[in-house]
Amino acid sequence: MAALFAGYWVAWGSTAFLTWALPMSRANRVTTASLLCFAVWTVAAMYAFAARSAWHAWWMLLLIGAALYAPALMFAAEAMRP
């Protein structure tokens, strides 16, 4: 469950972060971030299965997702949330 739901949260947060951080036009940022989110979700799922415990997997993935999503919320005018 952590790989599925918390991994999706990390992928969504990384998409929001990359649409804010990449130095391209808005359309290219959204497309690139959307394509990279699949790789991020794969890495998050692998981490969830490699974590020491289920709780550790959940909390680390939720924290990483929140840290990635926070800049997009703080700078919503410059970012385009996915």
Image (cartoon, rainbow, N blue to C red):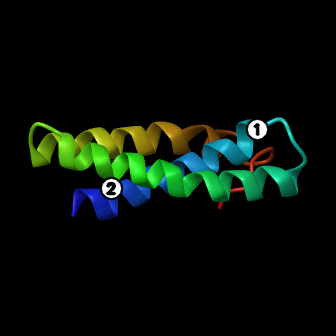
Q: Helix or strand or loop: what does disc 1 sit on?
A: loop
- Residue at the disc numbered 2: 6
Q: Is residue 68 left or right of residue 60?
A: right
User: Do the numbered discs 2 and 1 sit on residues whose CB atoms are within 8 Å?
Assistant: no
* Residue 35 or residue 17, whichever sits in front: 35
Q: Residue furthest left?
A: 53
| Tag shown at residue 31 | none
* Residue 65 or residue 39, whichever sits in front: 39
User: Residue 4: where, in percent of width, then height?
Assistant: 31, 64
User: Residue 77: where, in percent of width, then height?
Assistant: 79, 47
Q: Quadrant of residue 63?
A: top left
Q: Helix or strand or loop: what does disc 2 sit on?
A: helix
Q: Residue at x 24, y 42 (%)?
A: 59
Q: Residue at x 24, y 48 (%)?
A: 48
Q: Is residue 46 left or right of residue 71?
A: left
Residue 33 seen anywhere in this rendered image of the structure: yes
- In the picture, which quadrant includes the N terminus? bottom left
Amino acid, disc 1: Leu
Q: Residue at x 24, y 57 (%)?
A: 2
Residue 58 seen anywhere in this rendered image of the structure: no
The residue carrying pointer 1 sits among few (fewer than 14), some (14 to 19) or many (20 or more) residues within 10 Å by Cα, namely some
Amino acid, disc 2: Ala
* Residue 24 or residue 16, whichever sits in front: 24
Q: CA distance from mark 2 to mark 1?
A: 24 Å
Q: Is residue 16 left or right of residue 8?
A: right
Q: Residue furthest right?
A: 25
- Residue at the disc numbered 1: 22
User: Residue 19: where, in percent of width, then height?
Assistant: 72, 48
Between disc 2 and disc 1, whose residue precedes?
A: 2
User: Residue 39: where, in percent of width, then height?
Assistant: 51, 51
The answer to whether 8 is drawn above or below residue 71 in the figure is below
The answer to whether 77 is drawn above or below residue 8 in the figure is above
